[in-house]
């Protein structure tokens, strides 16, 4: 019961702090779920994040697996509601008030001011995943070449993500055959 | 009297059925592998069904980006709410996440079974490394305007250093840097020139092309 309670408030807090979307809140999520509450280990957090990349729809559905691991289907449900419902309600209210503050100069101030903060947070989220996944030449090569490919032209990211996973599994075998012992 | 009835009938005929909303968002949620959900939503709700025009879509995107939460889900709430009120918002979000929920729970079950399989571990490490490349591109593209503006770049660097290097709790970062950033852009501040305002308009037009081109 205490477990469900903790899952609820942690993910509600993360939902409210998720300015700039899911990536922006990744460092805080890792800190709370790995270091503070020990719900998952560092490598499990990375695995769960990767599973979110492979599934369709919003990648952040991966939070369900943290709940599932802690308290089964009920845990997944609790985490899902805690992480998604607060922002849905907030958006609903904002949408209905939008006509009142659409033209307010302060709305522009919030939007302009928060945009670089959100970008900085996304950078921090990217860095957090990099620290979890880039620790040798192969992983560096995967991240670097996908970055270069996407800067060059638009390719379906799902294909690239799958290619990255397969490369990491297969490349050592390929090299073993190509390189002299 | 007859006019009133005719008007009411016309209005109810124009209401989009909830099941149609659900089905549309379900499709978007099922085929948007690897992110880019917003681009699919635009295709379905603007191009195909014409439920809203580009201008309304960009309004919805602006609200979604300013508020906390995932853009795709916030967008679904707004589009659903504008079409059919709270029930519309509910079925839109439910449709968007349902395919992903089923698949992620399935993947999670397999992952827990295979947690000691080194090949699965390696595959997921490679996926995470690939995600780093993907996230870097997305961040650069989203921030293409901010990275070249000294004030914005300073805010980006300050935020990154605070979170990643100094490990300051996120709520303090948002409170301190967020408030400072909003005050720097307060109405009438010099950073908000007339030139800026026209650029904002131009940006919106470019943004429109961007979301149209993404898929």
Image (tube, coloured by chain):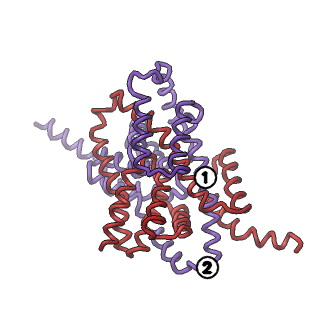
Chain colours: A red, B purple
- Could you tell whether B47 is left or right of B87 in the image? right
In front of the other: A43 or B92: A43
Q: Quadrant of residue A136?
A: bottom right
Q: Earlier in the sequence, mark 2 or mark 1?
A: 2
Q: Chain of mark 1?
A: B
**Secondary structure found at label 2:** loop
Per the image, label 1 sits on a secondary structure element best described as helix
Above or below, comparing residue B145 to residue B134 in the picture:
above
Quick one: quadrant of the C terminus of chain A? Answer: bottom right
Q: CA distance from mark 2 to mark 1?
A: 26 Å
The percent position of residue B128, horizontal first and vertical second, equals 60, 61
Q: Quick one: label 1, few (<14), some, or many (20+) residues within 10 Å?
A: many
Judge whether residue B20 can be spotted in this image: no
Q: Residues within 10 Å of mark 2 (few under 14, many from 20)?
A: few
Is A66 positioned to the left or the right of A127 in the image? left
Numbered circle sitting on residue B134? 1
At 60% from the left and 52% from the top, the residue drawn is B134
In the picture, the disc for residue B25 is none
Measured as percent of width and height from the top left, residue B178 is found at 42, 39
Q: Position of residue B173 (x, y in %)?
A: 44, 45
- In the displayed structure, would residue A142 be above or below residue B57? below
- The residue tagged 2 is B117
């Amino acid at each position: 019961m205490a477990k469900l309670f903790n899952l609820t408030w942690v993910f509600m807090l993360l939902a409210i702090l998720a300015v700039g979307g899911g990536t922006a809140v990744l460092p805080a999520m890792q800190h709370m779920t790995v270091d503070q509450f020990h719900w998952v280990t560092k490598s499990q957090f990375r695995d769960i994040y990767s599973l979110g990349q492979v599934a369709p729809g919003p990648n952040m559905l991966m939070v369900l697996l943290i709940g599932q691991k802690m308290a089964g289907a009920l845990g997944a449900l609790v985490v899902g509601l805690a992480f998604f419902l607060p922002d849905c309600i907030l958006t609903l209210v904002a949408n209905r008030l939008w006509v009142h503050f659409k033209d307010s100069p302060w709305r522009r101030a919030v939007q302009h001011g928060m945009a670089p903060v959100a970008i900085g947070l996304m950078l921090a989220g990217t860095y957090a995943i990099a620290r979890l996944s880039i620790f040798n030449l192969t992983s560096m090569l995967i991240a670097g070449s996908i970055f270069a490919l996407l800067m060059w032209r638009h390719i379906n990211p799902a294909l690239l993500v799958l290619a990255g996973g397969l490369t990491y599994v297969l490349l050592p075998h390929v090299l073993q055959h190509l390189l002299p012992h | 009297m007859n006019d009133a009835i005719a008007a009411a009938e016309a209005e109810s005929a124009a209401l989009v059925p909830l099941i149609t909303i659900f089905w549309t968002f379900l499709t978007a949620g099922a085929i948007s592998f690897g992110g880019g959900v917003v681009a699919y939503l635009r295709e379905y709700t603007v191009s195909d069904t014409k439920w809203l025009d580009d201008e309304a879509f960009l309004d919805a995107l602006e609200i979604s980006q300013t508020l906390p939460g995932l853009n795709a889900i916030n967008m679904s709430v707004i589009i659903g709410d504008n079409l059919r009120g709270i029930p519309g918002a509910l079925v839109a979000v439910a449709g968007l996440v349902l395919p992903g929920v089923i698949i992620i729970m399935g993947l999670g079950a397999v992952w827990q079974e295979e947690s000691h399989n080194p090949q699965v571990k390696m595959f997921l490490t490679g996926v995470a490394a690939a995600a780093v490349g993907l996230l870097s591109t997305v961040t650069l593209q989203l921030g293409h305007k901010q990275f070249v503006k000294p004030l914005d770049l300073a805010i980006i660097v300050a935020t990154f250093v605070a979170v990643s290097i100094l490990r300051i709790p996120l709520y303090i970062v948002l409170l301190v840097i967020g408030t400072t950033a909003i005050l720097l852009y307060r109405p009438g501040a010099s950073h908000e020139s007339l030139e800026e305002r026209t650029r904002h308009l131009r940006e919106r037009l470019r943004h429109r092309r961007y979301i149209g081109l993404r898929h």
